[in-house]
Image (spheres, rainbow, N blue to C red):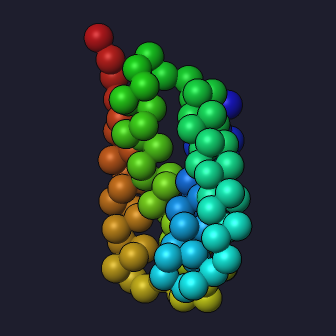
Amino acid sequence: MTLPAFLLAALGEIAGCFAFWHVVRLGGSPWWLLVGIASLGAFAYALTFVEAEAAGRAFAAYGGIYILSSLVWMWTVEGVRPDRWDATGAVLCLAGAAVIVFGPRG
């Protein structure tokens, strides 16, 4: 359940933040803020389904998924293709998330 929860959380967070970006930076309708608020609520709710002993560990591991998902959003929604530095950074972050999730504990 962890990976689907992370992916739903990423979609909610990115969509929510983008709605605010759309209003503030691109001059979109303020009605988009309602979409943003709902999406950010869905993001927070999705993270409650992550299998982790501590919320902080779940949030830290989620960071790698968020970064990769943000680059996919940039490419698919905004039409900006990630470059090699984006890809390298995403791989490093996913490696860090894997250490947090799969590292031996106690």
- Percent x, y of residue 93: 36, 56
The correct choice, above or below, for 20 with respect to 60 in the image is below
The correct choice, above or below, for 16 with respect to 97 in the image is below
The correct choice, above or below, for 3 with respect to 20 in the image is above
Splitting the image into 4 quarters, where does residue 49 fall? top right
Q: Is residue 48 visible?
A: yes
Q: Residue furthest front?
A: 30
Q: Quadrant of the C terminus?
A: top left
- Percent x, y of residue 77: 66, 79
Q: Residue furthest left?
A: 106
Splitting the image into 4 quarters, where does residue 46 fall? top right
Q: What residue is shown at x 43% (from left), y 52% (from top)?
A: 64
Q: Which residue is nearer to you in this view: 8 or 90?
A: 8
Q: What residue is shown at x 38% (from left), y 30% (from top)?
A: 57
In this rendering, position of residue 97 left or right of residue 72: left
Q: Quadrant of the N terminus?
A: top right
- Percent x, y of residue 29: 67, 77
Q: Is residue 12 visible?
A: no
Q: What residue is shown at x 56% (from left), y 54% (from top)?
A: 13
In this rendering, position of residue 34 left or right of residue 91: right
Disc tally is 0
Q: Residue furthest top?
A: 106
In this rendering, position of residue 102 left or right of residue 79: left
- Percent x, y of residue 75: 59, 81
Q: What residue is shown at x 68% (from left), y 57% (from top)?
A: 34
The correct choice, above or below, for 94 with respect to 26 in the image is above
